[in-house]
């Protein structure tokens, strides 16, 4: 799959991040001399965010910068246009794109609200042109509104939906072609009211943001307006809610479609309050703060398999199935290097070293990597079987600092019909110096019945083969160790 991006600003750079993190090769054309530097910064943000978001095996796509628009789009399967929101410019460039792209290439515009039927006016093959409207940051927010024009084919809509879904996104096909589509209409209504509240000196920009992020914003990340108000209606639900609060809509509290005039005074006031709110943080710093918070929210929702978290869970399950985690299969007769990581500064404690709990997390990831290696995948889990760790012994041998590259080497010490005995060695890369060891006993379980049960195929055979392949390896130093000091030796 090759994707061409025309326009590499906030949105084009964000698309590049999502595509590359999902293994797609991209070719970018942007006429600005600084575009490559800006896109590289976005790619670094995306890489950082995805490294935190998921441990699913992924191959990263490549990025090239084309010297001209025809060079960028010539071999592309999909072209995503993200130039400024100017209808004349977009029509001109979409005409050029469709003249040089393959006739079967899908052509999508990131426009926030221009009608696709109007964008189709000057293109060749308008049936393959549609809107794919994403949200910033594109590499983390899954929503993409898919809007067809009058001449767009159903086949093109279907292709766009599959393409975006393959990137872990949530394509929302908008039923009718309307200005602003769905999400931006809602956002614009809120934005208009926010401007009025500043204009009328009711609240500062920070107070308005607090009114969102401490309250409704937390709800919106997991349930939208309708489900939230259904609950607010109590046992009688939405009907009761509409009866109770419906009449108030007639008052009305809000300014509806009126827009405050953006006078120099109002613009100055908003800009000044916004500077104060940012507390000296640069836009890059704010982006990272935002990304870390979004990752944390997505992960919390993933644990509950709800809303965007359910999508992330499903996308990860697919990545575990489709991605070849390594280009070279490891030698099965040696300890297996299946998990690598770089120490994130947030794993470091007040002593300046990797915190004790993180060793357990990394060994847990290494165990998961071994289980995937022997075929314990999403389908096996869905079948009601898994392996639970029932005992662990960790030895902390060396201090580990932020940004150090690590690897875990896994040796199978034994396995029987229900159990698996693993020995992990955490090493520093590339020297191979031993930093810690973890010895673990796992039990195969029937997750529905909640009790141990023999391994099922194909995992059973692969566990046995891995144990046989390691049977002749020397028992590693430290295996079988318990705490060196016995409880009876502790003086009262
Ligand atoms: P931007 O100004 O950050 O980026 C536009 C890029 O297009 C720039 O890098 C510019 O150099 C490049 N460009 C301009 N003319 C060009 C040309 N002739 N050939 C090639 N490149 C050219 O804008 P943006 O925020 O990335 O918005 C791009 C599109 O995405 C718009 O249609 C916008 O409505 C839409 N969008 C924006 C957001 C958002 O939050 N910023 C969200 C969703 C959709």
Image (tube, helix red, strand yellow):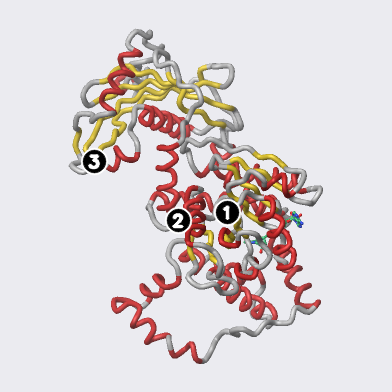
Classify residue 343 by image quadrant.
top right
> Is 341 located above or below residue 217 in the figure?
above
Q: Quadrant of the C terminus?
A: top left
Tell me where residue 68 appears, x and y as whole percent: 76, 47
Determine if residue 443 is in view.
yes
Residue closer to the observer: 13 or 237: 13
Choose between 20 and 299: the one closer to the eye.
20
Write down which quadrant ligand 1 falls in.
bottom right
How many dots with numbers?
3
Question: Residue drawn at (40%, 16%), measured in percent from left and top?
Answer: 332
Instruction: Answer left or right for 74 relative to 420.
Output: right
Closer to the N terminus: mark 2 or mark 1? 1
The answer to which image quadrant residue 316 occupies is top left
Callout 2 touching callout 1 (CB < 8 Å): no
Q: Nearer the viewer, mark 1 or mark 3?
A: 1
Please, what secondary structure does the residue beneath circle 2 have? helix
Q: Which mark is residue 328?
A: none
SS label for mark 3? loop
Closer to us: 158 or 443: 158
The answer to the question of whether label 1 and label 3 lie on touching residues, with beta carbons closer than 8 A, is no
Residue 40 horizontal/vertical position (percent): 70, 43
Q: Label 2 belongs to which residue?
A: 308
Which of pointers 3 and 2 indicates the residue nearer the eye?
Answer: 2
- Identify the residue under disc 3: 447
Q: Alpha carbon of mark 2 to alpha carbon of mark 1: how far?
A: 26 Å
The answer to whether mark 3 is within 8 Å of ligand 1 is: no
Mark 2: few, some, or many residues within 10 Å (few <14, many ≥20)? many
Identify the residue at horizontal 51%, vertical 52% (top origin). 164
Question: Residue 106's mark?
Answer: 1
């Amino acid at each position: 799959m090759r994707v061409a991006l025309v326009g590499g600003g906030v949105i084009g750079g964000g698309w590049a991040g999502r595509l590359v993190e999902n293994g797609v090769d991209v070719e970018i054309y942007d006429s600005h001399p600084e575009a490559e530097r800006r896109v590289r910064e976005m790619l670094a943000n995306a890489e950082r965010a995805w490294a935190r978001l998921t441990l699913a095996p992924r191959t990263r796509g490549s990025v090239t910068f084309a010297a001209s628009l025809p060079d960028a789009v010539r071999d592309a399967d999909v072209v995503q246009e993200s130039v400024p929101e100017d209808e004349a410019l977009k029509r001109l460039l979409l005409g050029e794109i469709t003249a040089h792209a393959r006739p079967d290439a899908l052509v999508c515009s990131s426009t926030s609200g221009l009608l696709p039927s109007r964008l189709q006016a000057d293109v060749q093959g308008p049936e393959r042109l549609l809107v794919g409207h994403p949200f910033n940051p594109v590499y983390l927010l899954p929503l993409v509104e898919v809007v067809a024009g009058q001449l767009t084919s159903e086949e093109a809509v279907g292709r766009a939906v599959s393409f975006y879904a393959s990137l872990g996104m949530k394509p929302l096909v908008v039923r009718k072609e309307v200005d602003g589509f769905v999400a931006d209409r809602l956002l614009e209504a809120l934005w208009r009211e926010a401007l009025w509240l500043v204009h009328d000196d009711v609240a500062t920009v920070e107070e308005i943001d607090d009114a969102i992020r401490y309250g409704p914003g937390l709800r919106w990340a997991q349930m939208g307006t309708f489900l939230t108000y259904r609950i607010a209606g109590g046992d009688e639900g939405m009907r009761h809610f509409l009866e109770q609060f419906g009449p108030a809509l007639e008052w009305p509290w809000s300014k509806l479609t009126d827009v405050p005039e953006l006078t120099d005074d109002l613009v100055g006031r908003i800009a000044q309050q916004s500077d104060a709110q940012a507390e000296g943080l640069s836009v890059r710093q704010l982006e990272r703060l935002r990304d870390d918070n979004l990752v944390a929210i997505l992960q919390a929702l993933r644990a509950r398999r709800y809303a965007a978290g359910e999508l992330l869970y499903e996308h990860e399950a697919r990545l575990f199935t489709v991605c070849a985690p390594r280009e070279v299969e490891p030698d099965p007769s040696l300890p297996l290097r299946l998990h690598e990581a770089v120490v994130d500064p947030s794993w470091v404690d007040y002593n300046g070293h990797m915190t004790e709990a993180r060793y357990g997390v990394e060994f847990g990831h290494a165990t998961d990597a071994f289980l995937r290696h022997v075929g314990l995948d999403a389908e096996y889990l869905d079948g009601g079987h898994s392996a639970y760790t029932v005992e662990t012994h960790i030895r902390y041998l060396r201090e580990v600092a932020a940004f150090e590259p690590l690897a875990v080497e896994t040796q199978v010490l034994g396995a029987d019909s229900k159990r698996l005995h693993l020995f992990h060695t955490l090493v520093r890369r590339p020297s191979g110096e031993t930093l810690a060891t973890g010895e673990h006993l796992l039990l195969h379980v029937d997750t529905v019945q909640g009790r141990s049960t023999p391994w099922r195929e194909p995992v059973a055979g692969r566990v046995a083969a891995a144990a046989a392949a390691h049977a002749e390896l020397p028992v590693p130093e430290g295996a079988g160790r318990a705490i060196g000091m016995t409880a009876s030796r502790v003086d009262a």
